[in-house]
Amino acid sequence: MTEMTDREAIHRLILEYPRACDAGDFEGLGECFAHARVQFGLGDVVQGAANIEKFFREMMFIYEDGTPRVLHHATNCIIDFEPGGERAGATTWYVTFQEIPEVMPLQVIVSGQWHDRFEKRDGEWRMVERRFNPKFKGDTSRHVKPRPSVEAP
């Protein structure tokens, strides 16, 4: 049996988010960020598997096929280990495509970077922080639900 290197284990953790998101797997989204503090581009900060799962369920549109009809392409992943090798950081560039037949042709809806932090605990790597940093936005109106407006006091 071949074991993963630390770099491969971290890279796999990074790719769990697009896998779960593209599949509409909300439980999987909670699991991939179970130990992480997640800061979204909108400023929301969410922690804990159940809270993250709930956040995604409330935020994303899901279509008849059970998915958000998106495809994430993650690339240019740079992983840097801290001295001692028990902590690491990574920056990954991403592009998100969406297609909704008869409504929206295939198009880029957002691209940017994920900034992640990792720790190795009991021999296992886990993500402890993700910051979403969207750089360019297209039409996300059929991917992300409108945020409720907050009235000033």
Image (cartoon, helix red, strand yellow):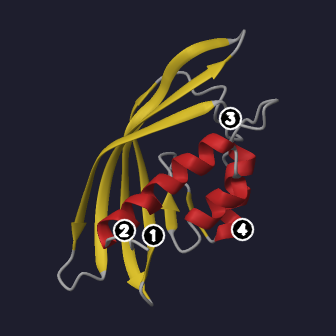
State which tag comes first along the sequence, 3 or 2: 3
Image height of 23 relative to 53, above or below: above
Secondary structure of the residue carrying numbered label 4: helix
Residue type at mark 2 is Arg
Which residue sits at x=77%, y=31%? 63
Residue on which disc 3 sits: 68
Which residue sits at x=66%, y=46%? 152
Q: Nearer the viewer, mark 3 or mark 4?
A: 3
- Could you say which disc has been placed on residue 117 in the image? 2
Image height of 57 relative to 1, above or below: above
Q: Quadrant of residue 75?
A: top left
Q: Quadrant of the N terminus?
A: bottom left
Residue on which disc 4 sits: 50
State which tag comes first along the sequence, 1 or 4: 4
The single residue placed furthest to the bottom in the displayed view is 122
Cα distance in 3D space between marks 1 and 3: 24 Å
| Residue 9 shown left or right of residue 138 in the figure | left
